[in-house]
Image: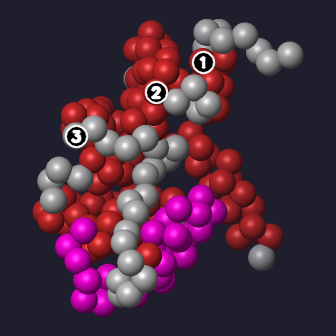
Amino acid sequence: MAAGRNCLLLILLLLPFTAAGQISVTTFGEGDGGARACYLAASDPLTLDLSACERALRSPPAALRDHLATRVNYAVILNRAGRPADALASLDQALGLDPRSGEAWVNRGNSLFLLGRAQESLADYQRALNLEVRRAHRVWYNIGLVHEQAGARELAIEAWSRSLAENPGFTLAEEKLRMAGQLPRPQ
């Protein structure tokens, strides 16, 4: 039991730096075959339980947009649970339904990043930005992580600065900029 708790704590400690840009997709209606429950599970940053999404995926979708959202939300939890290859497969299915889903591209980029394919993730993040994804500040933050990993400090700082410009209250970008000496430490 203690080992399982320690593993969960490690995942939770690493989560802000490896998957901060995860973006769940809102669904509509209560009688949606479980898509709403999947969305709520994906929106909870501590949830690793896939059952709501798996139930929703087994049910006939009430609407195409809810099925797409469920695929993306399922991938958010899969990434969080340390299963990025499975998340990538779900996101590819989502993009097969609608290649204009910015949230699917962001989360696909996250899956690639988690799979150690950081440079490939940049193209997916750029696609998401081109589609005017919600919460673009998270995409810019992730772009900064990719550049940081590649040793491109100036590009990382530029991306985190853009993240903070998009959302002045985004503490993860603030902290990265502080660590890079770009912002003063709070008093």
Location of mark 1 (residue): 177
Residue 182 rendering spot, x and y as whole percentages? 61, 9
Separation (CA) of disc 3 from disc 2: 16 Å
Q: Which image quarter holds the C terminus?
A: top right
Tell me where residue 8 sits by quadrant. Answer: bottom right
Q: How many residues crowd around disc 2 within 10 Å: few (fewer than 14), some, or many (20 or more)? A: some
Q: Which mark is residue 131?
A: 3
**Amino acid identity at mark 2:** Glu
Q: Which mark is residue 69?
A: none
Residue 63 rendering spot, x and y as whole percentages? 23, 77
Q: How many residues crowd around disc 1 within 10 Å: few (fewer than 14), some, or many (20 or more)? A: many
Which residue of the protein is positioned furthest toward the bottom in this rendering?
59
The reply to whether discs 2 and 1 touch (Cβ–Cβ < 8 Å) is no
Please give left or right for residue 15 compared with residue 124 in the image. Answer: right
Give yes or no for residue 106 being in the magenta stretch: no
Q: Identify which residue, 184 or 108, lies in the foreground.
A: 184
> Magenta segment, which residues?
37-65
Eye-nearest disc, 2 or 1: 2
Eye-nearest disc, 1 or 3: 3
Q: Identify which residue, 166 or 171, lies in the foreground.
A: 166
* Sequence-earlier tag: 3 or 2: 3
Residue positioned 66% across, 18% down in the render = 179
Which scheme is used to colour this image of the protein?
Answer: secondary structure
Residue positioned 27% across, 38% down in the render = 132
Which residue of the protein is positioned furthest toward the right in this rendering?
187
